[in-house]
Amino acid sequence: MKMAFQQFVKGLANLDNIEKILQDVKKAASFSGTIRSNLIHMLDECGVHEAIHVKSSSSLFEEHRQLLHTTSIIKYPVFYQGKNYTGHHPIISHSSLLTTYAYHIFPQEFSQIEQPALIIPLGKTVEHVFDKLNREGKLPEHFYLYGFPHPSGANGHRKKQLLLQKESLLSTISAWAGR
C-alpha cells in the first residue's frame, strides 16, 4: 500500500494523466519488494516464462504487464487488532465484511478474466476460498495452480513446498500452455 501511495504522489508531481498514474501505481505496487522477487523466481522455476515465451517471468511486471492481472480476494488493506490481517485470524467466514469481499465481490471481478487463464492462488487461505467458490459453481473455467506456495518472505517453507508440489504445478502449466 505504501508503494502504491508513493507511486501515486510521484505521478501527480509529474502531472501525468490519471489513467497513466493508476497504471503505474498497479505496476509498482503489485507484489512489490521481496515478495515479487520470490514470486518471479518461483514462476521461473515452474517454467511459466517458457509457457508464455518470454525470457523471465519478471517481464510480467514490466514489458509484458498486459499478460498479468494481479488481485486479491480481499483487495483492500485490512487491519485486525492494530496489525496487518494475514488471512488467518479471524477466519474469513467468521467476519461478515470479509465474507462479503471474498465470496461475493471477488467472484464478480474474477468472472471478468478472459478464459482460459492460468490462475495462481497464493497460499492456503486463498485456496480454501477457491475451493468453496468451486463447490458453489462460482469459478470460471481456468487452469488453477493449486499448491503454489505463498511467496512471502514470512513463508520460510516456500522452497520446500515448491519442491514438493513442482510435478503437479508443471503438469498444470503444461496443460494450460498446450490448450
Image (cartoon, grey):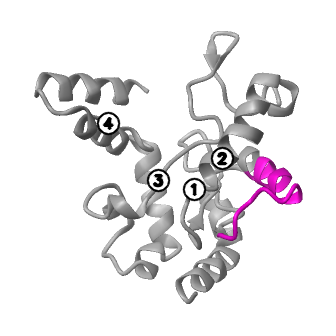
Quadrant of image for the C terminus: bottom right
Q: Residue at x 82, y 55 (%)?
A: 131
Disc 1 from disc 2: Cα separation? 7 Å
Residue at label 2? Answer: 108
Pointer 3: residues within 10 angstroms few (<14), some, or many (20+)? some
Which of disc 1 and disc 4 is earlier in sequence?
4
**Residue hosting label 1:** 112
Residue placed at 38% from the left, 40% from the top? 33
Outermost residue toward the left in this view: 14
Q: Which residue is mark 3?
A: 38
Q: Residue placed farthest to the top in the image?
A: 82
How far from the left and from the top, in percent, is residue 15? 11, 27
Q: Mark 4 to mark 1: distance in Å? A: 19 Å
Pinpoint residue 81: horizontal percent, then vertical percent: 70, 10
Please report whichever mark, 2 or 4, sits nearer to the chain's N-terminal start: 4
Q: Which residues are magenta?
A: 127-142
> Is label 3 in contact with label 2 (beta carbons under 8 Å)?
no
- Find disc 4 in the rendering and name its residue: 22
Furthest residue toward bottom: 178
Give the residue type at disc 1. Answer: Gln
Q: Is residue 58 visible?
A: no
| Residue 43 or residue 18, whichever sits in front | 18
Is the Cβ of the residue at disc 1 closer than 8 Å to that at disc 2?
Answer: yes
Q: Residue at x 87, y 55 (%)?
A: 136
Pick whichever, 115 or 168, lies toward us: 115
Q: Secondary structure at mark 4?
A: helix
